[in-house]
Amino acid sequence: MTASLGTYSHIPGFFAGDRPKVVTGRFEYEDSHTLTRFEATEGYAALRKALAMTPAAVHDEIRNATVLGRGGAGFPAGVKWGLMPEGVYPRYIVVNGDESEPGTAKDRLLLQHDPHQLIEGCLIAAYAIGASRVFLYIRGEMALAQERVATALNEAYDAGYIGKNILGTDFSVDIVLHWGAGAYVVGEETALLESLEGNRGEPRLKPPFFPAAIGLYGKPTIVNNVETLSNLPWIIRNGAEAYTAIGTETSPGTRMIAISGHVKRPGVFEIINGSTTFREVLYGEDFAQGIRDGHELKTFVPGGGSAPWFLPEHLDMPFESRPVGAAGSMLGSAGIMVMDETTEIPAASLTLVRFYAYESCGQCTPCREGATWLERILTRIVNGQGTRKDLKMLFEVGGTICPGDFPHASSERLGLTATPFPFKMTTICFVGPSAYTAIHSALTLFPDEFEALVAANGDGPEPTLNSIPVSIVGVRA
Amino acid sequence: MTDMVNITINGKAVEVAAGTQLIDACEQNGTYIPRFCYHPRMTPVGKCRQCIVEVDTGRGMALMPSCMFPVSEGMVVDTESELSRQVQEGMLEHFLINHPLDCPDCDQGGECPLQDQAYSHGPGESRFVEEKRHFEKPISISPLVENDRERCIYCDRCTRFADEVAGDAFIHFMSRANFTEINIFPDEPFASYFSGNTVQICPVGALTATPYRFKARPWDIAKEESTCQTCSVGCRVSVHTSRDNILRLEGVDSDPVNWGWLCDKGRFNYENISHEDRLRTPLVRDRSGNFVAARWAEALDEAATAISEAISKSGPASIGVIGGSRLTNEDAYAWAKLAKSVIGTDNVDAQLGDGLPAEVVLGLPRATIDEACLPGGTILVLGPDAKETLPVLYIRLRHALTNDGARLIEITPTDTGLTELATASVHPIPGHTAEVVRAILEGRSDSDVAGVSREEIARVGELIRNGGPVTVVYGRGSVAEAAGVTTEAVSLLHEALPEARFLPGLWRSNVFGALDMGLAPGVLPGRVRLEDGKDWISQTWHNVPASPGLDTTGILNAAAEGRIDTLVLLGADPLADFPDADLAARAMAGARTIISLDRFLTESTAKADIVLPAAGFGEVDGTTTNLEGRVSRVAQRVAAPGSAQSDWVVAAELAFKLGADLGFESSEEIWDEIISVSPVHAGLSAEMLAEAANSDGVVVPLPQVVETVVTPTDETDSADTDSIDVGDAEALEAASEEGSPTAQTTEADAEETDEADETGDARVLSEEATKPALIALSGPVPSLSPQPIDAYALRLVTVKKMYDQGTLTAHSHSLAGLLPGAQLRLYPADFDKLGVVDGAQVRLRSEVGSIVVSVTSETTVPRGRAVLLLNQPGDRATTLISSNSVATDVRVEVL
């Protein structure tokens, strides 16, 4: 521990600071991922405590703690568990460890550095809802996380924390580890279930809206995020009251965030939920320590690549989903991407749309065709080959993915008021709209930069196949 | 009665059945919502997003895919709102941006849902100026299907069909996003028996069928509905013709039968119709014994002379008529009347020894396909592999198993196409099937029976007793097992399960029509026993054989012994199809004159003395009868080649040459006579069949006929007469000895015939004669016991595959290459026992013959069995079989 307070040399990019630690408490130890360290630091104490309680009491405790889902939607875990139809068994828990949202890097650290905490959380959840099997789905690219979780599972099996008659009780559960094969869309919970079942990772049609009723193999299934479940041991150990004492009433506890981009100290932080503002995390000494020297904030994405963009005027917004939603964006997976004034906005939005176009599962038309089309129009514009008509077309093509009003932030400079969530969509899942988000925010908040790129071409000639130079994107023989 | 709900469509209040998908509810009420992925016969997937409309279910307007949104009370839908229109136009623009728009040279152009809906619901012009997505232009994914991935719009119809309807998930989405494509897995072709359906349901020209590619433009095609004549399922088809050529068949969505699906064999074997080898003129032998083309008059004269000489020399029983399942009902009736009334022989059989006695087939309570597929029912398959022989029945049964909670019990010689969905699948040692059925029905659990464990026997018995209503789908799973074994097994089932219904699994196209028309020994038209219906039919027919004649096995035995003078083959090829190859060859050599009505010079026809070219499917009007007893129409669309004639015309001409008048001059007139003569067809007028409401065909007997005609016969009476002839050798012997007295009676009757003709129209039915009762199966059936298997032998099982050397397949160039070839399939563990290796050539020797064949290992083959594919190139499996054996054992010799 050489650097400033709460930086650990063995976890570069993680900064603990002097704040309550619900899920990162063990990160200070280099061997935090081992069973030895885990047991030495109250590990599996919560499991013992939970097993002494009734499953209903454990469920109540979690419900009272109001643990908001950390995957992006922010749905309270305790409430989600209650959506399972009564008396239908077997039921499953699926852990969504397919963290791939651009700008997000929290679950990876939790998997790498405290796998037993997640396992304990899984066991508590399984006990509370009566699940006999837990499936841990971990993103294909996270090699270290996979290795450490696999090791931890073996340790926990050997020590009798998982398997038959856990800790001498009649509670038995198995945890199955599954590695993803590298598809962003599998982070969508129903696509994850399909992938787990051995099918193509394509989101399922809604309704049914929640896998809680019809999930994995058609059985009631709870899909929870890694961070969500990692919260449970602390809550059981310390009680829901201690948890709700941190943060605000509607957003209790702490929250893992990741900050990337043009800040002095990008990294992952566990912050107090609800009350912390974007200004604090971007400029605070304990956090990102401000925009890099000599530059100023231009815009930032508050909640992962799928979130509409915010401007400096939104810095005082707290980490609270309702006001952020009303302001036209979302907290999502809490991946904050910061852009300073040197950023070319059209190019930045192209980077994001390219990601989503590439990651579309190809199942539904507007996403498969529309996202790539958006990417290619934008590519032309960024290359200086666009016209004013193309700018209009971006909105129109986006409008086929998300017809009607689309959320965006307010802008004092442009005299724009915010359009709040939610929005209409023609796609099966949110990947399609995500491809449009960056374009929509960029075009809405920074129209002048696009204008500048197309100014030379004006309305352009009537486009014909021969007159427009084309770049061949996404084409293969 | 379904519940109705009130919904509002574009401001108009309507009432629709609860549970209807919104897209259908709108269409029923005159509002068409564009769609691509939605197909009413498959699970909605909502993938194309074209059918999204604005719907309010009380929570405000929302965009919902109407193909997977069942209507609910108070629902308000606006398919024409600005938002709905924006989405519809947007989707169509998306579909078209990467679509190559090569409509001018796309087969689908002109009948393309993408083209049509782009016009009706599209934005009018595209703003897409980028380069389109490129793939290699059509790649072959099977010998029958080409895949142009550039045209694909990813509607998931073909992949859904292959996976969920056909159970052959050989095509799949590959890759992702803009690179998504439909393709096969490397080196695994789309070898599905049902691949043609994907071409039919493809909403663009992505999947095209090689037999049709670039053959026609849709606007040059005339279409008419007909009934497929490939197997006895009788799928409704739309025949597409242009300039006197059949260019394509498409499945018609007939709710009780094929749901729009066809098998590839039925879909593509129309190619044989215009094959260059079709017989165009009659052929007779010249002095040196070579075929020479003849005029009809000469050929018919020769045929009539042969027949009348035979009658005068050895009596009418010296004439045998084999075949007739290729014929229409009208043709079959005309031939039954010619043979039984004019010639006077009852030695008539539409089946080729590979079927079941007519009395069994006609005498069991018949199930429809819908009844067999009853949700929650139990399907008991005794013998046939529906996937190979009755492919679309397989699709229907499969749907019942996967979607409707029906259960399948198989008692078959080997695994079938449905085995993986079966609740229980047992494979008795051939020859012992009836014994196993008996044990199952008696609930015996003390010992294993004929290769089936006692646990399985107990379990199957339990399933039959405690499952839903039982439908038995029965047939000959292997022709190496005597028909009598199956006969005994079904009669045991009938006796033990009086409520069970039976769906016969004989596969030849119109074999059921032929049997219904009396083309079998001992029966008369209308599923009536000869002895029961004699008086009734004498009012129309001048003459009726005195006693039951011989079936095909009997006729061939008699021919081999020189007791058949003239043998008539009605589209029959006994050399290829009769299970005892040696007997067939001896019979063909033994008959003095062979007259063959055929469309090709088959192996047997080539040995005939007089060959008469026959018209076939697509060339004749009439009706056909499927395995349910469903009568439906077949349509004439093209002219028969050369001077080929309908079979009934030949029958009428021959009758004329023999000095009799069959009394009809058109197939319509034949039908009128059929409904006046046949108790099962009574009431089914041609007008009724022509009604649009009956385009699926009509199951006979009609319900009102069942009430009036099917009177139970006297119990004591039926005990005597109803026992069935199971082809047991002694009975056959006895029957053939009766030949001469029969002949005398019929000769005497023949004289009366002439008188009757002079005295007037005999077709007016007298009011006093009561209609005869229909055949009902009852009474004891003799048990057959096969010889014990010696330790060095394997018991033979023959399997019919969909593609074999049958005339239709062999003369359809697209299908001819799909034959699996002759193969001996053995359980892998038997390899070591026999000391053979995979692919080795071995000699198989039975008591009566031997063949050389290559051997492959197959885990679906039960241990100790030798499975041979029937009628494949190479040595004939039937060389090994004797028609006298209950089961055949073979020894394998390594070469």
Image (cartoon, coloured by chain):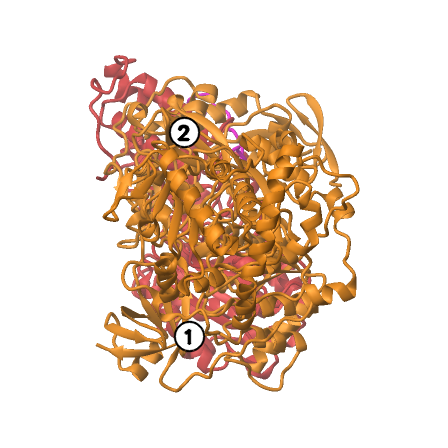
Task: Classify residue A79 by image quadrant.
Answer: bottom right
Is B768 rendered above or below residue A68?
Answer: above
Magenta stretch: helix, strand or loop mostly: loop
Name the foreground residue: B481 vs B145: B481
Q: Is residue B840 visible?
A: yes
| Rendered-image quadrant of the N terminus of chain A | bottom left
The circle on residue B888 is 1
Query: Looking at the image, is B619 positioned above or below residue B611?
Result: above
For disc 2, the chain is B
In the rendered image, the vertical position of residue A54 relative to residue B530, given as above or below? below
Q: Residues within 10 Å of mark 2 (few under 14, many from 20)?
A: some
* Magenta highlight range: A410-425
Q: Residue B590: x, y in percent?
A: 37, 60
- What residue does disc 2 label? B638
Name the residue nearer the viewer: A31 or B844.
B844
What color does chain B have in the rendering? orange
Helix, strand or loop at mark 2: loop
Q: Tell me, what hue is chain A? A: red
